[in-house]
Amino acid sequence: MAKNLAKHKVSVKTRECIIQALYQSLMEPSSVELLMQQFTKENNPKKISFDLLKSRLKYFFANEEQIIKLLDTKNKDDNYQVIDKAIMTYALIERDLKELPKEVIFDESIRLARKFSNESAYKFINAKLEKIYDL
């Protein structure tokens, strides 16, 4: 983990769990309750923020149709992976909640793409987020 992220270990790990939960939900419909049960069983509460995880999942499930419709409309001609969709979904959730600056959301999305997706996905995600972020 980069030095500048070391002091944000809990946030970083929580965001990774959010991406994993979103990916899981995009692959097979789930619920906040089921995902929270799974992630609380698999993770140490000292290493991730379950409150943050739960709040992002609640927002996603309450707004899933709009988020997916926006992503599908803006990316209709692109062939991208479900993990990339999960990362862009996370970015849109953070955009809507307005708790993080745009630069942090983009940096985290790129970092998450580098960690979870193929080697060039971060370029695709960055370009797509630039187009849809300010809608």
Image: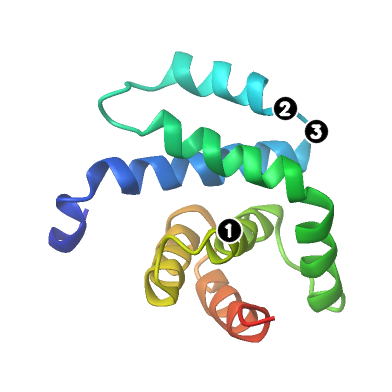
Viewer-side label of 2, 3: 2
Secondary structure, mark 1, is helix
Q: Which percent across, then down, holds residue 53?
A: 49, 37
Q: Position of residue 82 (x, y in %)?
A: 71, 53
Question: Which residue has dot 1 on it?
Answer: 87
Q: Earlier in the sequence, mark 3 or mark 1?
A: 3
Indicate whether 3 appears above or below 59: below
Residue drawn at the location 15% of the way across and 50% of the way down: 7
Q: Which element is circle 2 on? A: loop
Q: In the drawing, does residue 98 fall left or right of residue 132?
A: left
Q: Residue at x 13, y 60 (%)?
A: 3
Left or right, 26 with reference to 109: right
Q: Which of the 4 image quarters holds residue 61?
A: top right
Which amino acid, mark 3? Pro
Residue picked out by circle 2:
31
How many numbered discs sit on the rendered protein? Answer: 3
Q: CA distance from mark 2 to mark 1?
A: 18 Å
Image coords of residue 6 (percent x, y):
16, 51
Is residue 5 depicted above or below 70 in this figure? above
- Among numbered discs 2 and 1, the one appearing first in the sequence: 2
Q: What residue does disc 3 label?
A: 29
Q: Are marks 3 and 1 in contact (CB under 8 Å)?
A: no
